[in-house]
Image: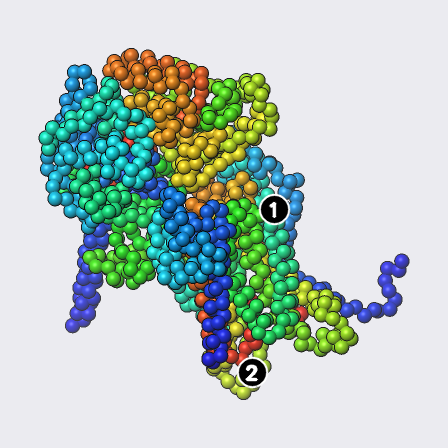
Amino acid sequence: MIRILARYSILFILTLLVLTILSFALAYLFPGDVLENLTGITPQNDMQREALMRQYRLDQNVVVQFVHYLGDLASGDWGYSFSSGLSLREEIGIAMPATIELSFYAILMALLIGIPLGYYAGIRSYSVSDKSINALSVTTYSIPVYWFALILILIFSLNLDIAPISGRISLLFDIPPVSGFILIDIMMTENIDKGLAMRDAFSHLALPTFAVGAITTASVVRLIRRSVIDVKNRPYITAARSRGLSGWRIFSQHVIRNALLPILPLMAIQITTLITNAMIVETLFSWPGIGNWLIQAIYQRDYPALRVGMLAVSTLVISLTILIDLFNRIIDPSREKYERATV
Amino acid sequence: MPQFSLYEEAFHPSPWHRTWAAFRESHIAIIGLFVLGMFVVFSVFAPVLSPYDPNAQNIDGLLIPPSWAMSGSISNLFGTDALGRDLFSRIMYGCRITLGSGLLMVVLAMLIGVSIGTLAGMLKGVRSSIVNHLLDALMAIPTLLIAIIIVAILGTGLVNSMWAITLALIPQFIHHTRRFVRSEAKKEYILASRLDGANKWQLFVHSILPNMTEMLVVQGTLALSIAVIDISALGFLNLGAQSSLPELGAILADGLDVAYLAPWNVALPGITIFVLVLSINVVGDGLRSALRKRMSQ
Amino acid sequence: MRYTPLAWLSLLLLLVVGVSACSKRDEHAFYNSGLVYCSESNPVTFNPQLDTSSTTSDATSHQLYDRLLDFDPDTGRIVPSLASSWLVSDNGLTYAFQLRRDVKFHTTDYFSPSRNFNADDVIFSLNRWRLASHDFHFVSGGRYPYFESLGLADNIASIKRINGYRIEITLKRRDSSFLANLATDFSVILSSEYGKQLMQQGFPNRIDQYPIGTGPFKFESYRKDHFIRYAKNTDYWRDITIAERLIYDITPRSSLRLAKLITGECDATAFPAQTELEIIRNREDLTLAEKPGLNIGFWAFNTQRPPFDNPDVRRALAAAIDKNTLLEAVYFDSATRAKTLLPAASWAFQNDADDTAYNPVLARKLLASAGIEAGFSMTIWAMPVERAYNPNATKMAELIQRYLKEVGIDATIVSYDWATFRRHLQDGLHDSVLIGWSADNGDPDNFYRPLLSCGAIPSGTNRAMWCNSDYDKLLDRALATDDLEERKAIYQQVNRLLYERLPLVPIAHAYRYQAYRNELKGMSINPFGGVRFGGVSKTL
């Protein structure tokens, strides 16, 4: 157990190191001036330039520069955005939670709907209901997420007028970002009608969550269904059946757990897809998350923002992936390291 | 030449024949294959089949509705866009670019992924563990992020976005190859050829690779659907193909500006991407279950 | 008793309905208390003195600030604002302004005024762009493009404080457009007391980022690419209805702005796209207001780069394109063809001015005689934002690209984000550019001088980089007289000169549109500059 933990922490640190090296290298790879790419500050004159060069150790060799860069990152000096001139740490501190919030609800939706549906389809495999669930999930899985979001907007916002299309909450509410999670921030804000604000926030959440969640749900359904069918064909199920155990007992005692285990590592891959989808959907719903922020940054060629944004998002994704992997190893140490379920 | 043979010969269908027989049993998979085939035909023969040049502007025919609409005309089957370009021709060329680049990326990712995966599968010990895990972790970076970084360094363009997607497609090939190589290496026939004195390279080319093709085809269709979705997403976000290049996602993004006036400019490219991806997925699913059936026989 | 449960149930039902009705009313009250305006881009600054883009003046001028004078939006006449009255001396050189009393500057978390508005604030604000010695002149870049392009600072001899509520401005030369210039969006009045306070604190830059003015709304917060949040100025001196909150929802995509207008997330939107006008007209819950605009969309050549320094080349390029097609395809007939810089709404409009015509044969001939061979390549810069005067520059560029191909020129289209685009334009990196100008007042000088005079090259409004001393002399002569007929005659000479030299091809004068929901009361188009939300309210 401790060995596993140690191995994973070493892995985590190594990965982070590679990522920081990458993000540091980006300052050199991006077009333009290294100093500006690294700090986001455009020096007004040569004197200020000299001073900044010294401050960021750019006059010394690359290793010293990198060590200094690490120190800056750790101390929270992530540089400034070209386009807004604001501290990148603050900007990411606002944008990141918005993406995490959206992804979290989407995952919640995918698990709450996807797991029961998947089990149902798996148990009733090759029946009509299984086939229709499967067809629905293949279809949903094939829809490009941005087009799906556009259709949702068309139906629910423009034609039925039941859900708003942009942002996290009506701008009339003045919610100062404290935690960055809108529902928590609403509870922490004074002088507003909290009930009204909550309702407003939920109506804003509905469509983007559904757009991101539907595709993940489809994947979860497919994964679980396949896994259940595989488990059903295992000898121990036949054995249990021959012992006369009822269908329900077989299901609750053997199938649920054993079908869930192999798909855990696949969930890690799903997270990457999910966050990509969330980032695309954000741009369509003007959701003030990290995806929207990064895409704005690329349109405006805001290199410092891209450098840090890349580091932040990849750190998030990789932490989650490694955590899920670790979790998986701990609850199921018998598994072969690279074994993965298939769809 | 005798039309029949006098003696009944034993016929052993090859594994591919058996897979095909299992595949054929599923009507949906056959329909999917047919639709996919149509897309391939459209893509290959787009210059011959398309009625107009996809970039030819026609000032007198801006935003003509599709032919089935009240005010549509048969001369522009899918109508025209805001610059009077024929949407049908654009979509046909769009399939060519989107599907073509998708295939190219999958083949490239497959080549790289299989090589790395084989190496990783043959490595042992701590080195293997570090390489594998690090690779795993780094490859979890979302495609969109890789694309954004590549676009920032090299600028926007179809080719640049293709690099990004290829990079993102590689890890799953690595995974599967690695797993496959590891599990195959334990089997007796490998041991047998090793005892015959085959070196690692011969082992790979003559024993492992032939057995891997099916896995690769299945993974390839999966990767192709991801590639098509991703390349069109990048086109849609203006990070990939630019609007003068008829790529399906870019056509859709173009249409967004006139979405209210000419909804078919958004609907038709979207439906095309959807049906294309759906047909790839249906064929992929069909292949997989056919393989599974064959294996369990 | 059998009816009791039923009675209880109905009582409960009544209660629920009552409560929800009550909260419904609260809800309406809340959503009606604020206005949301979908704007198209980020303001460059919160001080319109520093920037001529309409995004900046829409966001700030009439919301945060007041001017000495205003235009009456209906008649275009100059009316009192912070100056309650004014007198012009007989020689037309001295202007005396009597200032309004009891006008308070905004009280916010970052500033509480200790005194009312007075002459010091006027002098502080005017001197900021006029005098290089002013403490704040070089704060935030030190460029005042509107005033520089008109050469206004050079023409003011002195600004004198007579007493706390009276000032006198003396000019060097007569300028018949002087009062109009003081009424434009850019001549806003800042707080001198706030300036002093910031200077002491050592953050002079904040004067343009955390603005203080006398306008109907005060600044609360701003997040780039997301929103600007204003609150009601409860001490506003004019007796008009002001919404509790005013929010600018920054939405660059026009289709998204329309979508938000339809769902009611915005109450009004900037620049509805020409393609969307029909949809807005057809919807019963939306209003589309339109007025002929004071604007010009044009195709300017960088006359400092060969071969575009040759008027024959410019004429050839102008003859290669068909303006009517551009009008149809880009403006969807919501614009009139431009022959000169001036739109018909201006009093100096010349109906019989010369105009270039579509003639590719002539174009090829001119190009050949200028020594330009087939395959010559040039760039067309297309601005990345929508403006009334050019709602889709990229599309127009694509059309022009096709026309140029017919005369053997390969054009490439260049575009950057708006800030970079303007910076590169100012550096003169372009061969030609599709851009335009929205006037700030109806005076013809407001078109001719900023767009093509020598003085407007460094201030970055002369996109053709064209400098012609005859032209500048004519413009000066026009300003020296008050006789409209005489000025008109001079501007006709100017038009003739421009037709001969053709530093730019005038393309269109677009209508101005504003779309808003029917719940909004008191909205009107301000033909002389930015949108105004003072006096606008929302009722359901």
Chain letter for mark 1, please. B
Location of mark 2 (residue)? A236
Q: Nearer the viewer, residue A130 or A154?
A: A154
Q: Nearer the viewer, residue A91 or C240?
A: A91
Q: Nearer the viewer, residue B23 or C303?
A: C303
Q: Residues within 10 Å of mark 1 (few under 14, many from 20)?
A: many
Query: Which image quadrant for residue C35?
Result: top left
Residue B45 vertical placement versus C372 (above, below): below
* Residue in the picture at 20% in, 19% down: C93
Chain letter for mark 2, please. A
Q: Would you say the residues marked 2 and 1 are in contact, meaning their CB atoms lie under 8 Å apart? A: no
Q: Residue furthest right?
A: B1
Question: Tag 1's secondary structure?
Answer: helix
Disc 1 marks a residue whose amino acid type is: Arg
* Residue in the picture at 49% in, 27% down: C305
- Image spot of residue B224 (x, y percent): 59, 56
Residue C191 vertical placement versus C297 (above, below): below
- Image spot of residue C298 (x, y percent): 42, 27
Q: Quadrant of the N terminus of chain B?
A: bottom right
- Image spot of residue A139 (x, y percent): 52, 58
Q: CA distance from mark 2 to mark 1?
A: 50 Å
Disc 2 marks a residue whose amino acid type is: Tyr
Q: Nearer the viewer, residue B220 or A219?
A: B220
Asked whether residue B118 is in view, the answer is yes
* Residue in the picture at 52% in, 86% down: A244
Q: Which mark is residue B96?
A: 1
Q: Quadrant of the C terminus of chain B?
A: bottom right
Residue C451 vertical placement versus B218 (above, below): above
